[in-house]
Image (tube, rainbow, N blue to C red):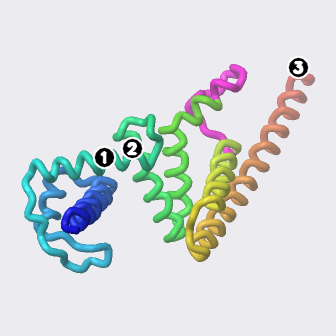
Amino acid sequence: MAGKANKAVMVERVEAVFDLRLGGAGFAEIREYARAPTDRQGQKLPPWDVSDSQLWRYIAAADKLCKERCDARAPHLLARHLLRRERLYAHALEVGDFKTALAVLKDEAALEGHYLRANAERPADGVDASSVGTADVVKLLAERLRQVDAAELSTADKSRLTAALADSLLRAIGVDVIDKRLEALQAVLIGRKDKAK
C-alpha cells in the first residue's frame, strides 16, 4: 500500500512541476517551490524534502508529459511552447481580451507551420510569404471552434469559449468580407486606369 501512496505522491509532484514548467519555471524556482509547496487553491503543503537529483527526475518526467500531452513527435521544447500558448489563449478568452487571443492563435499557427504550408500551396503571385490574411484567421478560429465543441469541458466552460470564439469569428468574417470587397474595388479601379491609358 505504501508503494501506491508513494506513486500517487510522485504523480502529484510531477503534475505540480509540469504546471511550474508551463509557467516558465526553471530548476531554481522548482527547488524553491519544493521547499514550500502549495495546492491549486494556494493552501500550504508539507515540504518535499527531496534531493536535487530527484527534482531533476521530476523535471524530466514533467517534460515527458509535455511531449505526451502535445504532439508526440514534437521535441519537448516545442510541445511546452504550444501548451503555454493554449494556456495563454484560454486565459485571454476568459478575460475577454480577444486581441491577445487572436495574437496567440496567430503565433501558435506560425509555430506549427500552418502559414508556410498554406503559402506553399498558393501559386506564386508576389505576395509576401510571411503575411497573414484575414481568411487565414477565419480558418483558424473556425478550427478552434470545432476543437472546443469536441473537447471534454464543463457546459459552462464550453458555452463561454464557444461564445467568445463565435464573436471573434464573426468579427474576422466581417473583416474578411471587407478585404475581399476592397480587393474587388481595387481591381476595378486598376482596370479603369489601364483602359484610360
Alpha-carbon span between mark 2 and mark 3: 61 Å
- Asked which quadrant contains residue 47, the reply is bottom left
Identify which residue is drawn at 56% across, 68% down. 153
Q: Kindly indicate whether the residue at mark 1 contacts the one at mark 2 (C-beta within 8 angstroms).
A: yes
Q: What is the x, y in percent for residue 161?
A: 59, 67
Q: Which mark is residue 67?
A: 2
- Secondary structure under tag 2 reads helix
Quarter in which the C terminus is drawn: top right
Identify which residue is drawn at 25% across, 61% down. 7
Q: Nearer the viewer, mark 3 or mark 1?
A: 1
Is residue 64 covered in magenta?
no
Q: Amino acid at mark 2?
A: Lys
Is residue 132 covered in magenta?
yes
Q: Residue under circle 3?
A: 197
- Residue closest to the eye, 126 or 120: 120
Q: Residue under circle 1?
A: 63
Alpha-carbon span between mark 3 and mark 1: 65 Å
Q: What is the x, y in percent for residue 66?
A: 37, 48
- Secondary structure under tag 3 reads loop
Q: Is residue 187 left or right of residue 138?
A: right
Q: Which residues are magenta?
A: 119-134
Q: Kindly indicate whether the residue at mark 1 contacts the one at mark 3 (C-beta within 8 angstroms).
A: no
Alpha-carbon span between mark 2 and mark 1: 7 Å
Quarter in which the N terminus is drawn: bottom left
Q: What is the x, y in percent for residue 44?
A: 19, 78
Q: What is the x, y in percent for residue 98?
A: 56, 62
Q: Is 121 above or below relative to 170?
A: above
Q: Which residue appears farthest toward the right when viewing the image?
A: 195
